[in-house]
Image (spheres, rainbow, N blue to C red):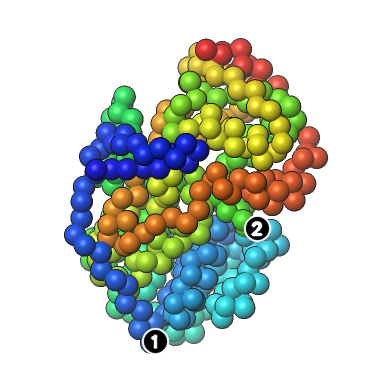
Amino acid sequence: MLSLLVASSGLLVSPGIHSAIRYSPLHSARMAAGDSTLIIQNKGGGHGEIGLHLALELAKKDTAVTIIHEGKDTGKPPHTSYGALEAAGVTVKWCGDLTDATAALESLDGASFTAVVDNWSKSPEQIKPYAEAAKAWGVSNYAYVSSAGMYTPEKGEYGAIGEDCTVKSSGQRQAEETLSDMELPFSYFRPQYIYGPSQGKSYLSFFFDRLSRDQPVPVPGDGSQYVTMTHAADNAAMIAAAIGNEGAVGQAFNCATSSLVSYDELVGLCASAAGKEATIVHYDPKGFEKPEGFGFKFPFRDTPFYVSADKATDLLGFAPKHTIAQDIAWYYQDNYVAKGLLDKEISFADDAVVLAAKL
């Protein structure tokens, strides 16, 4: 039976609208002397921090790690933490535009790898040249960091989404299909709502912006909708468990925690971290017209949207080590206060339009 831990209450729930499928016993990862992994890394954003933790995780397993990196060192998170990569013996090559795959691959000076993790491609055109190189190297694993945003549950079906849920034909889905068509030993990883100590993009600033300024927090619906907030180190640990693991080949994995938190509970956690009282106003997301130039955007979907990580537990032995409830205090200090966001000028004019549509 599908079981997901509710972060704030400790209760076990079985909400699955998509029935949990049990898989064959997990295969242990086999890391051998001479193993080497190439990480194709994006410049930042939602998935940016995964590459940092993944490289460190693989280095701990005595595999040589090289990163070909989009863009340049910005001096901002997660790049400010890259000193840890150098200390761990990870090679980082700043390649600028990774769409020039020829130049990026030439920067490797003829090196080959036993595994590839693609944390950059978002289309079949982007992934194909790197997949062709991986095929020539004879890799044991090509792990592709895709997105859980491709899932399209049936209208009115709310619950833990399994990997068997229908998906839309996004660029990332087409990239997944390209790996399959090329008969590479692929694994797809579909992350959802990431946080971490070196995060560039933050979903939680929406709440801290309002709470720290004693503003009401607009929450769609009744606030009971569940979401998963996953530490980037847990995302990385799941992906690392697939490298050298034949049981991961040909599989898609939801790359998320098993810990659930509702929207209202998340507001409460953020308020506690900020030392504030939370005033939540539930609004009807379809109950108002958006004026021209309207910029308000709730960071999550209006409806429940969360995935099941049961398959990764079964096949990879994955178990998350972090919960947002335990991490919210340092997250507020390190990813909000320390970045000077308390002093940022923010307009809440659009909030007034939303709050007028309260339930």
Kindly identify which numbered label has been placed on residue 226. none
Other residues around mark 2 within 10 Å, as few (<14) / some (14–19) / many (≥20): some
Relative to 282, residue 337 above or below: below
Quarter location, residue 165:
top left
108 or 145: nearer the eye?
A: 145
Query: What kind of residue is marked 1?
Result: Gly
Relative to 234, residue 69 above or below: below
Q: Quadrant of the N terminus?
A: top left
Tell me the residue at 48%/66% (across/down).
54
Query: What kind of residue is marked 2?
Result: Pro
Query: Can residue 240 be seen in the rendering of this structure?
Result: yes
Q: Is residue 233 left or right of residue 238?
A: right
Q: Is residue 238 left or right of residue 90?
A: left
Relative to 232, residue 86 above or below: below
* Residue that carries the numbered disc 2 in the rendered image: 77
Residue 257: where, in percent of width, then height?
43, 49
* Residue that carries the numbered disc 1 in the rendered image: 34
Tell me the residue at 74%/43% (across/down).
341
